């Protein structure tokens, strides 16, 4: 089985979010970039398929040279080959079209992409990619088994979960649950050394166009002070929630 | 040319997010000088949709659509959009709609903006405000294609009543072959889900262990709330992963969010910040949650929560 894991290069969850150039660009100053958490759960599941079922695992990012350390980290975790499509990521559809070309050219059976990236929160690349490829698609995937060309997956739904049967070629939107937090791998020295020698192939873009443009950014208005209620006067909280906040 | 809206229902009854999506579609239709067409799938009585600005309802009744299937539902909406010549299609942010919308966008060659929080600031160019960086910022995004798909955030625009009356029309689209088949659905019944809840009660590591969750469940029950938890609580196996909220868990956009024994780490706050009113109960007055909350009690959850449950029971009895 040939697996491709899509890796989004995103600011670490503790990053301060600021904008520059008249609030038109994300300010990367002092920001640490990491593998998007939802992608990392997917990559870790892919490593299981590699070790238990002999799958090959490639990772891919659509972006500029600045994303290479993130791809190297994925190689250090255990992916075989990295691919960088050499173009700036502009929106979900453009990224999905660039990915679709590589998936078609590479004949991948399973594509794993995080259900959402924690920067632009689009939540659209996996679904668009599946639709462009006319592949099967399971979003919010919290369990995946593959036997031959048949797949069994579990999807998280609002208020529960759903078990589905489908087949390859398949795209999944990965998230926590697909593997546990404790299954995530911190690359060791050997992994990091090996990753330096693994191929990181740069491919030229198909020049897909974006369909949306982020014109400007803004930050939420600062919040007012918290109103403290005495621990011995809980009735006051009920009163405030009813009469002032009007939420109960 | 009408604005198309997918009005989701559960066992025949419309969800609140469907009424919110309809209200939003109405606002866009007014700006564009057109009408609103809703698509319902196996919903019984759709007359209520008129109250939220829907002019026409395309009713789809097909037992093969009883269980949700993203590809089939996307195909239904695509055919409805094409029949109506719709330039704008509005869907909600439920798990199902977020699953379907990207497929629909590809089918319609449409640009798709998700997590939209406000009515468009302009219709030419079509510009919407959306949540990015998990509630830490907003982007003003223009959708540059002829047809646009909008995913509306929950509880951001609100439900707006209207006085139209909706005409119904049966609609029988052709369905694609189903290649992802649902074998089992495991859904809690009689319990509010985090996605639909108006109130969410959430517990953190400060509660010390899973055996102490009774009071969280009791508090949720008096309030008709859903229960949630912080990430370590689900990682420790005290609560199921489905209750993990925050940047790497489920987003919460309820009217009221009550955090008990949660410190308020940046990743936690990011995911729940879209909630309208936040309450924190924590022994540590320095806990960062107090900076994000509207109301707070500095105190021991094991004393405060039982008192709060009693006070709420008294309050409910008086209502
Ligand atoms: C990549 C990444 C992603 C993450 N994503 C998320 C996420 O999505 N969601 C999330 O929640 N976290 C997330 N985290 C974890 C986050 O950083 C915090 O570690 C976590 O939110 C802390 O959980 P907590 O508040 O329950 O526990 P703690 O930080 O241990 O806080 C417990 C709190 O309980 C209080 N307390 C103790 N006893 C009592 C008592 N008797 N009564 C009242 N209060 C009491 C304490 O004062 C303390 O403030 C993420 C972390 C990383 C690195």
Image: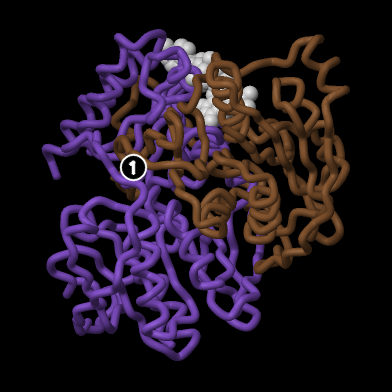
Looking at the image, residue B163 lies above or below residue B7: below
| Residue B97 visible | yes
Looking at the image, residue B95 lies above or below residue B284: below
Quadrant containing the N terminus of chain A is top right
The structure residue drawn at horizontal position 49% and vertical position 51%, both measured from the top left corner, is A135
Query: From the viewer's perspective, is B225 left or right of A23?
Result: left
**Viewer-side residue, B178 vs A12:** B178
The structure residue drawn at horizontal position 65% and vertical position 30%, both measured from the top left corner, is A57
Badge 1 density bin: few <14, some 14–19, many ≥20, Cα 10 Å: some
The answer to which quarter of the image holds residue B42 is bottom left
- Percent x, y for residue A30? 85, 35
Query: From the viewer's perspective, is A83 left or right of B26?
Result: right
- Percent x, y for residue B102? 51, 59
Residue on which disc 1 sits? A158
Q: Could you say which chain is coloured purple in the image? A: B
| Residue at the front extreme, as displayed | A148
- Percent x, y for residue B86? 44, 82
Quadrant containing the C terminus of chain A is top left
**Viewer-side residue, A228 vs B271:** B271
The structure residue drawn at horizontal position 40% and vertical position 14%, both measured from the top left corner, is B237
| Residue at the bottom extreme, as displayed | B33
- Percent x, y for residue B24? 41, 71
Chain A shade:
brown
The structure residue drawn at horizontal position 46% and vertical position 78%, both measured from the top left corner, is B28
Tell me the subunit letter for badge 1. Answer: A
The answer to which quarter of the image holds residue B173 is bottom left
- Under circle 1, the secondary element is loop
**Viewer-side residue, B83 vs B236:** B83
| Residue B263 visible | no
Looking at the image, residue A145 lies above or below residue A223: above
């Amino acid at each position: 089985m040939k697996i491709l894991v899509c890796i989004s290069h995103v600011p670490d969850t503790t990053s301060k979010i600021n904008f520059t150039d008249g609030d038109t660009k994300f300010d990367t100053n002092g920001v640490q970039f990491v593998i998007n958490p939802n992608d990392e759960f997917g990559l870790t599941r892919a490593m299981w398929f590699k070790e238990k079922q002999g799958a090959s695992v490639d990772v891919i990012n659509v972006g500029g040279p600045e994303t290479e350390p993130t791809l190297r980290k994925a190689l250090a975790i255990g992916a075989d080959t990295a691919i960088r499509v050499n173009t700036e990521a502009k929106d979900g559809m453009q990224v999905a079209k660039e990915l679709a070309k590589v998936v078609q050219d590479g004949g991948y059976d399973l594509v794993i992409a995080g259900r959402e990236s924690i920067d632009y929160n689009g939540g659209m690349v996996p679904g668009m990619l599946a639709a462009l490829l006319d592949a099967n698609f399971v979003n919010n995937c919290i369990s995946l088994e593959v036997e031959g060309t048949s797949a069994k997956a579990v999807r998280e739904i609002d208020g529960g979960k759903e078990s589905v049967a489908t087949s390859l070629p398949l795209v999944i939107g990965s998230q926590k649950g697909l593997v546990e937090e404790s299954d995530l791998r911190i690359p060791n020295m050997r992994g990091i050394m090996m990753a330096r020698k693994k191929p990181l192939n740069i491919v030229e873009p198909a020049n897909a166009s974006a369909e949306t443009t982020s014109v400007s950014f803004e930050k939420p208005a600062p919040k007012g002070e918290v109103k403290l209620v005495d621990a011995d006067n809980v009735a006051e909280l009920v009163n405030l929630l009813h009469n002032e906040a009007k939420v109960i | 040319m009408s604005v198309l809206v997918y009005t989701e229902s559960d066992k025949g009854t419309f969800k609140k997010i469907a009424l919110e999506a309809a209200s939003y579609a109405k606002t866009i239709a007014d700006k564009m000088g057109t009408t609103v067409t809703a698509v319902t799938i196996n919903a019984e009585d759709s007359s209520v949709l008129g109250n939220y600005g829907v002019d026409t309802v395309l009713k789809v009744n097909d037992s093969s659509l009883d269980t949700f299937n993203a590809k089939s539902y996307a195909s239904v909406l695509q055919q409805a959009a094409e029949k109506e010549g719709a330039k704008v299609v509005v869907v909600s942010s439920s798990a199902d709609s977020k699953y379907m919308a990207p497929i629909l966008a590809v089918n319609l060659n449409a640009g798709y903006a998700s997590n939209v929080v406000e009515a468009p600031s302009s219709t030419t160019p079509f510009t919407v405000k959306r949540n990015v960086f998990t509630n830490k910022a907003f982007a003003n995004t223009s959708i540059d294609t002829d047809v646009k798909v909008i995913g509306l955030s929950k509880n951001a625009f609100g439900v707006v009543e209207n006085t139209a009356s909706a005409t119904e029309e049966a609609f029988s689209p052709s369905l694609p072959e189903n290649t992802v088949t649902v074998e089992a659905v495991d859904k809690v019944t009689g319990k509010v889900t985090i996605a639909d809840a108006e109130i969410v009660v959430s517990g953190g590591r400060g509660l010390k262990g899973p055996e102490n969750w009774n009071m969280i469940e009791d508090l949720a029950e008096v309030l008709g709330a859903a229960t949630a938890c912080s990430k370590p609580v689900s990682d420790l196996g005290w609560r199921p992963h489905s209750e993990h909220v925050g940047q790497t868990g489920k987003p919460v956009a309820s009217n009221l969010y009550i955090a008990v024994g949660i410190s308020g780490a940046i990743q936690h706050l990011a995911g729940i910040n879209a909630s309208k009113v936040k309450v924190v109960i924590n022994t540590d007055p320095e806990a960062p949650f107090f900076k994000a909350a509207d109301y707070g009690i500095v105190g021991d959850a094991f004393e405060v929560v039982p008192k709060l449950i009693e006070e709420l029971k008294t309050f409910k009895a008086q209502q």
